[in-house]
Every structure is written in C-alpha cells, then in structure tokens.
Amino acid sequence: MLWLLGSLFFCALIVRELVGAGRADRPDPVYPPYLILLATLAAACAWPAVSMWRFERFLAEKAMVLTDGKPASVHCNSVLDTMFDRNLLAAGHANPETGEIVFQTPWCDVLRDYLDDPASAGDRQIVSLNLFTHEAIHIRGELNEAVTECQAVQYNHRAARLLGVPDALAKAHALRYYRTLYASRGQVGGYGGMYFSDRCGPGLDMDLRLPDSTWAE
Ligand SMILES: [Zn+2]
C-alpha cells in the first residue's frame, strides 16, 4: 500500500510538470530527463504491488484446478492487513461461501521463494505448499480441519506440479510433508493436533485413492 502511495506521488509530480509547462507564468519547457526519472520511480514503486497481484491471480487460477472449477480468489495479506485480520493467528484461512483464500504475511513470499527455487526447499517452503493446498480444499466445502489436512496431504503432489514444481521434486516434497511435518502434528496435540488424524494414511478411512496421491506407489 505504501509503495502504491509512493507511485501515485510520482505520478502526481509528472502531471504537475506537464500541466505547469503549459502555463504562461512558467516559461521553462518540460525537461524530459526529469520526466523519465519520475516515470521510472513511479514504475519502481508500483512493481511490488503489481507483482503480488499477478502472483495472487496465478495462485487463484491454480487453486481453481484443485477446487474442480469452484471459483476461488487469493489475497496475500500485507503486514498491515495481517494486523487487522480477525484470523491473525492462522497462517491462512478460506471461506467456501465467497471462495476467498487469504494468506497472512509472509506466507506468500515463502511460497514464492519455494516456486522460484524448489530444489532448495526447506521445511518452511514445503509448509507453504501445504498451506496453499489446505486452503484450496476448504474452498471445495470441507471445513473439518483434520479431514482438510489429510486431503491436502494427498493433493500436495498434484498441487506442487500445478504450481510448476518438477514432478520428482513435487513427489519428494509432498512425501516429506506427509512423513515428517504432518506426522509431527500427531505428537504435539493441542491446536496443532487438531489437524492430525490417525485415520489418515494409505488404505485408511481418509484415503481418497487419488491416482496421483502423494502416497501412491
Ligand atoms: Zn484449515
């Protein structure tokens, strides 16, 4: 938001320069290098917001594949947005009625880092992949956290490929989430334990038997 205000400020200076040049009380002509400098600064300030907007559109488009076409939109919260978000403590949240998925700061940046360089992914980057899948599953209409998380575990392989991660890495990261990060949720109990079920695994009650499931052989 602050960057956009900066961009608007430089745009206003451009307008002032162009309008002012036509006035009789200002004999100086427009100075092109100054206008180019202002335009460059305006574009540079606008770029972070434009880039995030494009990333949100990209994520929404991929989320809609996971929701089987059910409309979805994605918003990446800024620090300010996060501070005023009622679900401040959750890394993300989704509303199946409106299709809106929200990621708190800095999870969009973490996910973008992951997609820029999946070969170097650490646990945090893999968690950001699961967060994306988890919220997309909510948009399908599933609200139970343990069921949603178990479905996300199974869809993570597909989700990573949809986001452009090479297949071998997508499979390895999805399995890593299932075998270590998801499994650890069962041990912590409390809030984290809400997302775990011992009925989640190959051949168990929550197995969706997807052909490209994370745990498919
Ligand atoms: Zn959830």
Image (cartoon, rainbow, N blue to C red):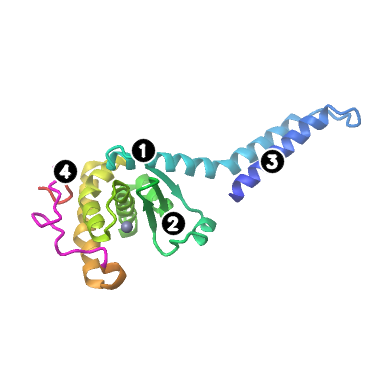
Q: Quadrant of ligand 1?
A: bottom left
User: Looking at the picture, which amino acid does disc 1 mark?
Assistant: Glu
**Residue 73 coordinates in the image, percent (x, y):** 41, 43
Gap between marks 2 and 1 measured at Cα: 19 Å
Q: Earlier in the sequence, mark 3 or mark 1?
A: 3
The residues tagged by marks 3 and 4 sit, at their Cα atoms, a distance apart of 50 Å
On screen, 59 above or below 144? Answer: above
- Give the mark nearer the N terminus: 4 vs 2: 2
Which residue, as the protein is rendered here, is positioned at the far right?
Answer: 25
Answer whether labels 4 and 2 touch (C-beta < 8 Å).
no
Q: Would you name the residue on which mark 4 appears?
A: 212
Q: Which mark is residue 10?
A: 3
Looking at the image, tell me whether mark 2 or mark 1 is earlier in sequence order: 1
Contact between marks 2 and 1 (CB within 8 A): the answer is: no
State left or right for residue 172 relative to residue 123: left
Q: What span is colored magenta in the figure? A: 194-211
Q: Main secondary structure of the magenta part?
A: loop
Decide if ligand 1 comes within 8 Å of the CB at mark 4.
no
**Label 1 sits on residue:** 61
Horizontal and vertical percent for residue 211?
A: 13, 42
